[in-house]
Image (cartoon, grey):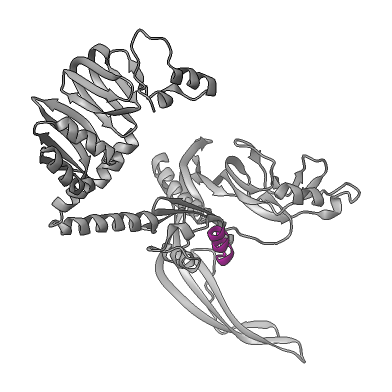
Amino acid sequence: MADRRRKPDSSATAWERLADVVDISKNVMLGMPLVTLLGDRELTIENYVGIIEYGDEVIRIKCKAVNVSITGKNMELKTMTEEFLYITGRFKCFSYEY
Amino acid sequence: MLFIRILNYLRGYLLITVGGRFPERFMNICVHRGIRVWDVSSKGGTFKCKMAAEDFFRIRDIARITGARVRIKRRLGLMFLLRRYRRRWPAVIGLILFAAILYITATRIMSIDITGNERVPDDEIRRLLAGCGVSVGRSTADIDPDTVRNELIMNSDDLAWVGVNVRGSRVYIEVVERLDSESVPHITEEECNLVASKDGVISRLEVKQGQTMVKKGDGVRKGDVLVSGVMDSVYGGFRLVHSYGEVYALTEYSAKKEYPLTYTERVYTGSEKTLYGVKLFGREFDLYTKAMDPGEGYEEERNENSVTVPWINSEFGGVAKRFREYTDTQTHRTVQEALETGIAELTEQVEQSVPDDAEIISKENDHNILSGDTVEVKVTYICSENIAEEEEIDKSLIDKNENLDYDIEEDTNE
């Protein structure tokens, strides 16, 4: 398996195109996190690898393709399972890191 | 979520703090090894989180690898709660006892209330109830009210209706007794009318069966039909019934007598004489010579003992004559005195004529002066009494061709 990470400005990778063709969900195929945000209060991330940093103001999560960084206040990891993370708090910023 | 929380509570969980250089690593490894961690919060580089109690022994390795310092802050959940109260086992026994008592008192008969009985004693009904499985301490679930009711009515001659209500652990028995057949006077078992036994004015009617022919306030003569045993039917025709009931009427008992103001009073002087005679062949022979003349100051009282000899058809015997001397004196009395004497005499007379079961409503004395020297005194008692009397229906008067709806009667009784 080649490096599935891609440059932010590059167009769709071969894997992405293949996923389109065989119609398999991309988050599995490309290792992309499936992020569900409910306003600035609740966040669910599926398909993650682990936590890089955890504090009540910054949380960084390692995913297969990209890393996710959330900043905010009073953040709390409500649930941690192998499949998903459930985070509550007041979010300020949601960004991807490469 | 709520379900998961309840499950966690039941299984017991720990509140732990994770310190060290990289608590995040500790978390990651926990998650990858399938150890559930939730409610993670961070404060100054130290994590606070919850985990299942049974997983705690599996994090020893992880803690060593990551160099994390794990401390148990609190033990939560039912398991730890029970462990804490392990020494208070009497409380558990009390709890079980409480539940048991609650169960027993809620499902067993605690009391039986019997209402509505006057003649039949409570104990008798309780005995009958025990016979069909209803007694204090028995299960309420076993009671079938219909069966109990039927059993009771069948086993007792005096119960006409029984209601069985089970409310919680109490059983309420309502009974209606059969009409006391002894209290209703029956001269006949046949169909009959009720007729008036006396003259009177109807004051109260208690008709239990039959067609009422009079109403309150009616005046009736002796022999009038009060309640007819011939009942009209709504289906046409009529049927015969044994009418019974009580008909109360105001009846009058009175006595009247004239009292003269001037009257002769006979006073016996006390001197008396007894003379004897014999009777031979039906003829009387005095055995004394000087006869006292009765009528003129003497009163004669004959006392005769004689037998008739059959073959010669003649009387033989003795006669004793008692002569009592008296003097008649003309006495005068006032109206007031005559009244007092009259009322006293007549009241006694009236009271004797009033039957025992009649209730005296009012007493009246009346008088008027006749022709100057005579007072007429009248004493009247108004009584209330049952004047109903049974009388057989004269069936010869009933037209046999008219339809007697006996068949319909059975329908209507249902």
Say if residue B78 shows up in the picture: no
Q: Is residue B305 above or below residue B110?
A: below
Q: Main secondary structure of the magenta part?
A: helix
Q: Is residue B69 above or below residue B318?
A: above
Which residue is nearer to you in this view: B244 or B144?
B144
Which residue is nearer to you in this view: B163 or B1?
B1
Residue at x-position 36% and y-position 19%: A36
Residue B156 percent coordinates (x, y): 55, 65
Say if residue B319 shows up in the picture: yes
Residue B401 percent coordinates (x, y): 91, 49
Q: Which residues are magenta?
A: B147-159
Of all residues, the one furthest to the bottom in this rendering is B311
Residue B301 percent coordinates (x, y): 53, 72
Residue B99 percent coordinates (x, y): 29, 55
Quadrant containing the N terminus of chain B is top left
Residue at x-position 23% and y-position 38%: B30
Q: Is residue A75 left or right of residue A44?
A: left
Q: Is residue A68 left or right of residue B158?
A: left
Residue at x-position 48% and y-position 22%: A19
Of all residues, the one furthest to the right in this rendering is B401
Residue B151 highlighted magenta (yes or no): yes
Q: Is residue B152 above or below residue B322?
A: above
Of all residues, the one furthest to the top in this rendering is A9
How many marks do you count on the picture? 0
Residue at x-position 33% and y-position 21%: A65
Residue B297 highlighted magenta (yes or no): no
Which residue is nearer to you in this view: B1 or B302?
B1
Q: Is residue B108 left or right of residue B32?
A: right
